[in-house]
Amino acid sequence: MIAGFDYGTSNCAITAVTADGVTVVPLYAEQTLVPSTLYAYQRSLIMAALAQQLPDDAGKADFLRTRSTLLAKAREDMREYDLDHAAQGLFFGEDAIAQYTAAPDEGYFIKSPKSFLGASGLRQNSIDFFEDVVAAMMLNVRQRAEQFLGQSIRQVMIGRPVNFQGIDTETSNRQAQAILDAAGKRCGFTDIGFLYEPLAAGFDFETRLTEERRVLVVDVGGGTTDCSMVLMGPKRLPNRDRSGDFLGHSGERIGGNDFDIALASRLLMPSFGMSSFLKSGLPMPVSPFVNAMAINDLGAQADFYDQKTALLLDRLLLDTTEPALLNRFVGMRHHRQNFAVVREAEQGKIGLSSQPLYQADLGFIEPDLTIACESEVYARVTEPLCVKIAALVEDAIDQAGSLPDCVYLTGGSARSPLIRAAIQQRVGDSLPLIDGDYFGSVAKGLGIYADRYFTS
């Protein structure tokens, strides 16, 4: 069976090519989206769960060899947790979030691993680990989809941003796509193709066009923003090769996660001591607070949980003028609750899109702890992000050499009034912004293109 797989920074979705066309597959009851999160009792169980389902071939032998140390630990961990199968110690999506929320300082939790795939300087053991994390998440989606469809999925078109995170863009893109490819094969897909996510979203839109249009597709996801200027129309729809219709593209690692982090850093962290002063009169160093909230930055997270940060906080506690606030921060670090803080910031971002005030509920840090967040302040602190997104729009237009006939918006973060206003200002009020299926356009377009790609 042929499928389109949207392995997103925030959510995953899969579509299947059936006799009735391209269908978005329900994964959890009626839910077609699963948050891109994983929780494991122990990291070793991720590798063990994959090892238990790999076919007996040369690939399995190599996997067992390169992960032998962790697999040996997994056997001990399975005995400790009284597990018959390693997969019993893994949780995905909302189940993973619930496990983490209940015990944030236990187990292993990862959110949005796609954000890390293009990170510069990854050693081979880190690349291996991300391959396994992505493969475990893909396997969960694939198995749930196959259970619903009653058929095996073998051929898949996977979406990818124009650019992943990384200092060297080309190297970053190669590394990230190679991880996705290896993970896809490890979870059982035999034929894998890749397509830019904004193009995929555009193909979904194209099925509704009755005449040729010059379309600027703006895909603002959780981790990246991609813009593609594409010639579209009913006569072009059947073509497998669309390279000649691709007039310009731009992309950068700016997405909804960055807006969450901005809110968490600038509006929430002052209540943890970030804006306080030391007894010497100097301001509190901000790097621990910034690193804590930068959950999409592998290096920042490593620094935050490094012993040197613990020693720095010990010294700052002796010198701060507001020890209660800094102790709150130290407690958050000790219980590994920084992901939960950013998750509440995400709820604040959503709330402030339609109301002037949001009371962030941080009762998981301290009973009755709430922090008032104002929409005007949030707009100011996120303005630089909106400016960068607008610049990407302008770059794609400049490459194409002309304005589009319309702008097609997709990606969950494209719903933000702040982002929409920045885009509208850049393209002009006379140009219509067309709303796509914010969470389903990419997956549907991947399925449409997959059908063409694998059957022509």
Image (cartoon, rainbow, N blue to C red):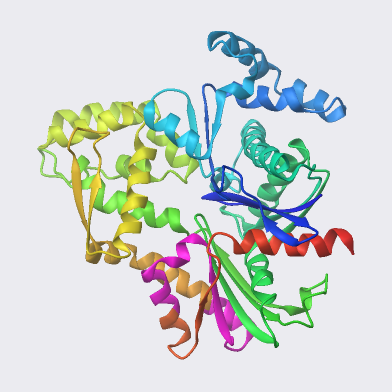
Task: Please tell me which residue is depicted at 68% across the width and 76% down the height of the picture.
Answer: 206
Compared with 331, 449 (above or below) is below
Residue 77, x across and y down, in percent:
57, 13
Residue 150 in the figure: left or right of residue 332: right
Task: Please tell me which residue is depicted at 77% across the width and 57% down the height of the picture.
Answer: 17
For the residue pair 118 and 78, the one nearer the viewer reads as 78
User: Is residue 310 among the parts visible in the rendering?
Assistant: yes
Compared with 66, 186 (above or below) is below
Compared with 210, 347 (above or below) is above
Task: Please tell me which residue is depicted at 56% across the width and 84% down the height of the picture.
Answer: 406
Residue 23, x across and y down, in percent:
69, 58
Residue 184, x across and y down, in percent:
73, 42
Residue 354, x across and y down, in percent:
30, 65
Image quadrant where one finds the C terminus = bottom right
User: Is residue 162 among the parts visible in the rendering?
Assistant: no
Q: Does the magenta stretch include residue 12?
A: no
For the residue pair 5 and 380, the one nearer the viewer reads as 5
Task: Please tell me which residue is depicted at 67% across the width and 81% down the height of the picture.
Answer: 209
| Extent of the magenta region | 394-423
Q: Is residue 406 magenta?
A: yes
Quadrant housing residue 327: top left
Overall secondary structure of the magenta section: helix
